[in-house]
Image: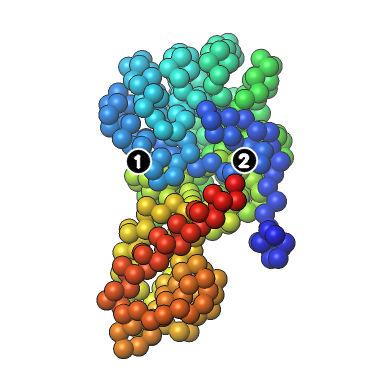
Amino acid sequence: MSINHIRPWRHIERRKSRQIHVGNVPVGGDAPIAVQTMTNTLTTDVAATVAQVQAAAEAGADIVRVSVPDEASSKALKEIVSESPVPIVADIHFHYKRGIEAAEAGAACLRINPGNIGDEKRVAEVIRAARDHNCSIRIGVNAGSLEKHLLDKYGEPCPEAMVESGLDHIRILQDHDFHEFKISVKASDVFMSAAAYQQLAEATDAPIHLGITEAGGFVSGTIKSAIGLGQLLWMGIGDTLRVSLSADPVEEVKVGFEILKSLGLRHRGVNIISCPSCARQGFDVIKTVEALEKRLEHVKTPMSLSIIGCVVNGPGEALMTDVGFTGGGAGSGMVYLAGKASHKMSNAQMVDHIVEEVEKKAAQLDAEAAAAE
């Protein structure tokens, strides 16, 4: 039975969208919400770019975007695609020929910006290349690069201008009988982005790529993205997302998954529930959680772990988690397994012991899942 039938206040009714494919990754329809990131290496540095793609994939990225600013990058893209474990999206700006070259190089998707890709004839050539090479397209509208005629019409970047830009380019793709596309309407302003996405969701059934563009550094960007993307996802809007941070792409992937995990929309790895700690704590909660986050990064199986400093909330939280530890006295605490008190463990040994218990539980869950297939 779905948890949403038991707890209806947790239910999210996802917007119904068409499904397309980015390589072998389905986007839209009933597919899981895909997590993306983007490399920040020079694309011509193939080794560095492939290493970054692989690190992002290991962190859970379903799709990775790579910038293609010049012909040399187009040539490098072919090798990057061949070595990538996930589909590659080619990020195209200003020159439509880069889009054609990227499709020929094996990109799974082309991101084109209506504000700078050129006139309809040039877009038509990109569409032709995408069709010929089984490549999807993302219409990537950005508040910072809207078409001049829309800025003249509306006076400034606004949700209405962004949506009009996106719908204009949807029309171009549809006029050329091309339907393998998704769309985004990003702004760095959370209010503008949210309003634009809500209008867009009502105007088209195309899959929607979510993002708060240029969100900022790790802390501020994470908060802005969690607010903006979180409310849209809660409303059921969004089929794929990227958290845009001035940080390592791996951190973007981690934040994206945490947002989805918080809403029960994707589950990957260990969800650690921990208290902020206080004078009642029976062990150093902060250092313990930091250690466990690093030690458990390799676990991909969806499961939960509670780390609570004292008995005020510890036993209650442990009831709802696969593995738990609650601080007690005399240098030890209680280990909980499947919500039940199991045995005591010393604080000195508890990190190693918890890692063992989590790995054991993950193996059990994986075996159960395999047997059910």
Task: Name the residue located 45 percent from the left edge and 84 percent from the top edge.
Answer: 311
Q: Residues within 10 Å of mark 1 (few under 14, many from 20)?
A: some
Residue most toward the front?
371
Does residue 230 appear left or right of residue 37 in this picture?
right
| Label 1 secondary element | helix
| Label 2 secondary element | loop
Q: What colouring style does the render use? A: rainbow
- Quadrant position of the N terminus in the picture: bottom right
What percent of the width, then of the height, locates residue 229?
A: 55, 49
What's the CA distance linking mark 1 and mark 2? 23 Å
Which of the two labelled residues, at mark 1 and mark 2, occupies the earlier sequence position? Answer: 2
Depicted 88 relative to depicted 351: above or below = above
Amino acid at the residue labelled 1: Ala
Residue at label 1?
Answer: 55
Depicted 194 relative to depicted 128: above or below = below
Q: Quadrant of residue 274?
A: bottom left
Q: Residues within 10 Å of mark 2 (few under 14, many from 20)?
A: few
Does residue 307 appear left or right of residue 167 in this picture?
left
Task: Name the residue located 40 percent from the left edge and 66 percent from the top edge.
Answer: 357
Disc sitting over residue 31 in the figure: 2
